[in-house]
Image (cartoon, rainbow, N blue to C red):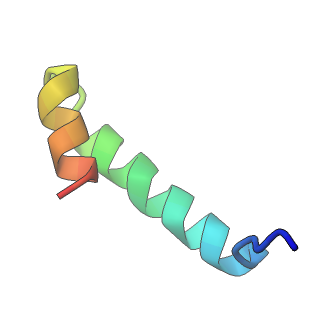
Amino acid sequence: MLIKPSKKNLKNFLCKVREIIKRNPTLPAWKLIGQLNP
């Protein structure tokens, strides 16, 4: 059995990730990853 998140939860998660990336366009990749994965 494959368990997947609901479309609503997936959309919400992706919006949060996009917002973090848009707020920090000049951040080095390693710092950005640190923010995305606290």
The percent position of residue 37, horizontal first and vertical second, equals 25, 52
For this orientation, the residue located farthest to the front is: 1
The percent position of residue 10, horizontal first and vertical second, equals 64, 67
Quadrant in the picture for residue 23: top left
> For the image shown, how many numbered marks are present on the structure?
0
The percent position of residue 36, horizontal first and vertical second, equals 28, 50
Q: Where the C terminus falls, by quadrant? A: bottom left
For this orientation, the residue located farthest to the right is: 1
Q: Residue at x 54, y 57 (%)?
A: 14
As drawn, 27 above or below 1: above
Q: Where the N terminus falls, by quadrant? A: bottom right
As drawn, 35 above or below 15: above
Q: Residue at x 74, y 79 (%)?
A: 6
User: Viewed as shown, does residue 13 lie left or right of 32?
Assistant: right
User: Viewed as shown, does residue 17 lie left or right of 34?
Assistant: right
User: Viewed as shown, does residue 25 lie left or right of 22?
Assistant: left
User: Viewed as shown, does residue 25 lie left or right of 18?
Assistant: left
Q: Residue at x 18, y 49 (%)?
A: 35
As drawn, 15 above or below 7: above
The percent position of residue 31, horizontal first and vertical second, equals 12, 33
